[in-house]
Amino acid sequence: VKKISEALFPKSENESVLASWFFLMKAGYDARVGYGDGLAYLLLPSTKPLFGLPYFSFSGTSNRYYAFSLDADRWRLPRAVTTYEGNYSGATRLFDFSLTMLPRLGSRPVPKKIRFTFGQEIRAISVTVDPNLAGFLRMYPQTPFDVYFNAPVSPAAAHDLVEGLAPLLKGKSEVEAVNILLRFVQTAFKYKTDQEQFGREKPFFADETVFYDGSDCEDRAVLFSFLVKSLTGLPVVGVNYPGHMATAVKFSTEIGGDVVQVGGVTYTICDPTYVFADAGRSMPEFKGKEPRIIAMGTQK
């Protein structure tokens, strides 16, 4: 909708915002518009909380209306806006920022070599990345972590990751296979904070972790969880400590080491950021701390 509006009003950001507002209301969405510091902003309600965005409340509804600018400098957001109380008849749909399917943006596939440490060797696999998808995800609002853990991975990247790593796991035990996947995620990407890369908090979807050269702990946890489910079928959850994200895997038998209880079931800590740490090893500063569990799909 925004791209269409920009094509209609290429020289006026405010008019393109107003056009987006009009189209969304006509499509039945409860969109509003605000104005502040000379700029128009879309005000959109969400079924999930969004982070890093100011929001406004209106009488007669409990919805939070989050402010989006949607321009090239969209993260410069208002402290206050002038707006209105009225409702457009029939515009009642809320935005759901759960990413249950990827948009059809017109694929622009680019092969990327990803190098990692396997045993004493440096190995490489080729993974298809898509700048169009990365551009879309870069602008995605920051949502609760369960959205990232449960979002789909693009078919091309998913295929290449599975095909590239499956031969290394052939004939391995559950623990050996998980340790290989740990080593892949631990060593394939440079560690970079969100502030270093974007100047703001920006958790990655799995496709973004593969696309960018740098990532941090929550990004690696999301990608590792996808790999575990796809290549081993073992149940896996996100493990969210204050200031750090790891994962935990449910093995068929208990293997010892650091664990967490998920619904009375033992899951073994697997930290894809703790370089060269095998399953069962937590970073020392988080040993014994109680994390928040992030479920990924239906866990057994």
Image (spheres, rainbow, N blue to C red):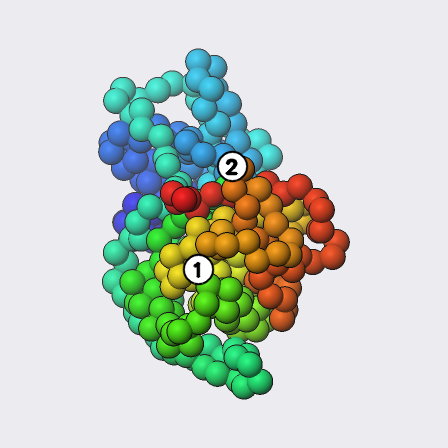
The residue lying toward the viewer, choosing from 27 and 283, is: 283
| View extreme (top): residue | 60
**Residue 221, position in %: x, y?**
53, 56
- Regarding residue 240, the answer to whether it shows in the image is no
* Amino acid beneath label 2: Gly
Q: Residue 239 carries which label?
A: none
Q: Which residue is drawn at 50% across and 69% down?
A: 176
Label 1 belongs to which residue? 228
- For residue 119, above or below residue 273: below
Screen quadrant of the N terminus:
top left
Report, in whole angstroms, how far the alpha carbon at label 2 lies from the one at label 1.
20 Å
* Amino acid beneath label 1: Val
Within 10 Å of disc 1 (Cα), the crowding (few <14, some 14-19, many 20+) is some
Pointers 2 and 1 in contact (C-beta within 8 Å): no
Horizontal side of 1 relative to 217 (left or right) equals: left
Label 2 belongs to which residue? 263
**Residue 238, position in %: x, y?**
53, 49
Q: How many labels does the image show?
A: 2
